[in-house]
Amino acid sequence: MSILIMSDTIESTQSKCMKESDRSGAFDHLFTATVQDQIGSTGYGDWRLVSASDAVSLGYGFPYPSSLPSDDLVTVTEAVLADEGEHVLQYGGGSYTEQLTDFLVERAQSSDIDCDPSNILLTNGGTRAIDVVCRAFLEPSDSLIVEGPTFMGAISVFRNHGVEIDSFDVDTDGLDVDAVAEELRTREREGREIPKLLYTIPNFQNPTGVTLSLDRRNRLLELADEYDFVLIEDDAYGDLRYTEHELPTLKALDDTGRVVRIGTFSKTIAPGVRTGWIIANNEIVEALRKLNAGGTNTFTRSLVAHYCTTGKLDEHIEELRDVYEERRDRILHALETHMPPAAEWTEPEGGFFVWVTLPIHIDTEEMLHDAAENGVTYLPGSMFFPTDEGSNSLRLSFSYVPLDELERGIAALGRTVRERL
Amino acid sequence: MSILIMSDTIESTQSKCMKESDRSGAFDHLFTATVQDQIGSTGYGDWRLVSASDAVSLGYGFPYPSSLPSDDLVTVTEAVLADEGEHVLQYGGGSYTEQLTDFLVERAQSSDIDCDPSNILLTNGGTRAIDVVCRAFLEPSDSLIVEGPTFMGAISVFRNHGVEIDSFDVDTDGLDVDAVAEELRTREREGREIPKLLYTIPNFQNPTGVTLSLDRRNRLLELADEYDFVLIEDDAYGDLRYTEHELPTLKALDDTGRVVRIGTFSKTIAPGVRTGWIIANNEIVEALRKLNAGGTNTFTRSLVAHYCTTGKLDEHIEELRDVYEERRDRILHALETHMPPAAEWTEPEGGFFVWVTLPIHIDTEEMLHDAAENGVTYLPGSMFFPTDEGSNSLRLSFSYVPLDELERGIAALGRTVRERL
């Protein structure tokens, strides 16, 4: 992943990173080989601060600020501390852990996932869940398969495990499963190692917004069983669906126990509560639990439990669907209005993101400077690939900025693109 | 580590672990070699539920329940959400992150530690901090040195990295640094690999309560520099000192940047807020930041920041010192009164723990059943060694149970030991 071109108007943590010339490198030889390989590269979270004053920030994949349930969380904090203050603040936590686990079990069962509490592991958010799963399965000699493009936080986690990352194209039906099948056949024929894991975001994928079709879901499960690998289903956005048409999750279709399903409350309650979960085969959960060093935050876990079990979560999800559907409609309309015919984009049925593909000669990293000057920022597509791809694409997030700024941002983007045609 | 002998009166998560015969092992071959080695072993946190009804629980190394600042945390939550609710609940957090970092910098500087914000990494508690440090330095072929006995959570983390763990004796002045020096000399002479890390808890060590002498601190730093390894200083209990005599921390004595210092608010605010930190050389911090997947909990981090910067932490620490000093005095007096002459124990100047050594023929794992029947539980010493040692020792925690139960617990322990003499 190359470094973003920054200007004075664009702030970045790049400036916080030490310049190569300032490093003494005194301890580099003590780091693991994987860590040594990562020296000087951008790290997890470094992309967050790409912004420019006065520009509409379509880069941030953050929940809409006014939708964060601050007031409810004050009430919930009071209730939880009054009720079980000692346990909530102590090691281990109190009954809220069990309540939250039971809530997740019921919720999973209502989506046709066969599970009980032994199938659930609570984690400090979704990204930490991905990290723990990798710890259980990946050694530096292993490889894994991802969608290209995919969630950059996951790429960062995979890189930290020192493994080979192979990415496969995504189209309007999600991951190109036929291409994956072809690669697996080739590897088997040539006696090469089969990947240990395949990481997919089946619903409203980050960054493309597309959804994996039912047929491809079934094919993926067949492949996982045939070639003996584990499927990580990251369903961070699944609850934020703006249409009626709901597909079964990979975990619901899973007969063999090969699917490790990851969920999070970051999009449906708040990122700040850092509470996610894993649903998996109980032997896998038992291994993951040992690797989940330091456990989870008992305090916020208790708040989340109270929020969920008192019915607030379901109400809030209903509201969020309306909030984000309106924004999705607005950004798609603005794209129709302002983008030149040479641009293409996805039409998400849920989630936060639209993926834009521009003519091949346009480099969206390089274009970001002018875009910011024109009044919009986005994330360049190259940031979402493990390899050097995606230079003519970009991710727009319609979740974060005020509704009435979306059109101004897209108008600025359209202007910026037209200047380059 | 062998499994505790449980009776009907002693509850344990052993019962939650699957029996070997129930395991299908269907995915074992996909796990890393390290994870495969750990199948069937006890995991982090499994020891927590060793308890018996009616018995005085001297096993739990938990803060005193009534000392947990529940009321203050309600006030702080209201203040923080009213002030910066959006940022506190969002990715990245708000200004509280910077406030907490600055607070930690000032505090470190006032203890003669040379540092600035680039030397600080916030983590989800102290154990997670240990895990992240291991991720940066340890590969399965590496080894590390620990005190024997040491914090069982750390042993669990080290095991998860698949490394060789060598433990060295602890006496009333802490780790036997001469023995470490001798081992390092031998390894160098024989051309064997030098350990990458040495993990020490210099103040009021868990589980022995002893403090590493100044002379040994200086010797350790010399050894680290001579043999090129990194020192992990876990100072979880350093603030809870009951005497005036304060020794400089390893990090304050560190001229070379080899000390990675770990702190936590688990003992001084509450375990439930899961907030810890690392102070280290900025290049090491940069590497650790990339490995700290999912970041820290912005919500509880903000509460902690507000609690600290409004002066509540310092006041609370003063109160805690009095609370725990009284308990320390009470348990030592009870030991004098009730234990037979053949028993020995440490006299901690701070922290939560007393370490008891019994005649060599007494097996404290086996004795636990009778102790529970007699009215007291403790943690057997063997749980704190990476190898098969410590069978005639045990850890008592004076932090958790009500003050007036301490004597009853120790009387029951004395009775149980005398039955075996």
Image: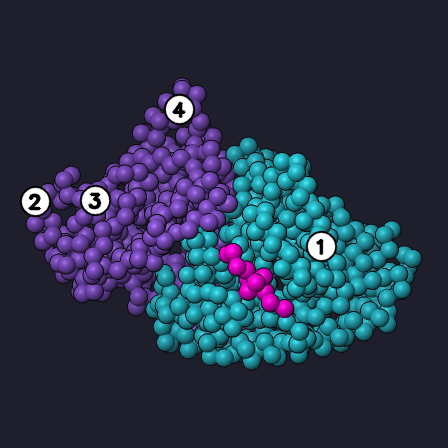
Chain colours: A cyan, B purple
Check disc 4 and give the amino acid type: Arg
Residue at mark 2: B421
Whether B323 is among the magenta residues is: no
Q: Position of residue A10 (x, y in %)?
A: 74, 57
Same subunit, tags 3 and 4 = yes
How packed is label 3: few (under 14 Cα within 10 Å), some, or many (20 or more)? many
Residue B171 image offset from top left, x and y in percent: 25, 38
Q: CA distance from mark 3 to mark 2?
A: 15 Å
**Distance CA(mark 4)–CA(mark 2):** 41 Å
Task: Give me the residue at 33% from left, 40% from top.
Answer: B386
Name the foreground residue: B236 vs A350. A350
Q: Earlier in the sequence, mark 3 or mark 2?
A: 3
Q: In this rendering, which labeled residue sits more in front, label 4 or label 2? A: 2
In the rendered image, is residue A117 in sight? yes
What amino acid is labelled 1 in the image? Asp
Q: Which residue in the protein does label 4 denote?
A: B187
Q: Which residue is mark 1?
A: A176
Query: In the drawing, does residue A330 fall left or right of residue B354?
Result: right
Q: Which residues are magenta?
A: A247-257
- Residue A149, picture quadrant: bottom right
Question: Taking A402 as reference, is A91 left or right?
Answer: left
Amino acid type at circle 2 is Leu
Residue receiving disc 3: B393
Q: Respond whether the residues carrying marks 1 and 3 are from the same subunit.
A: no
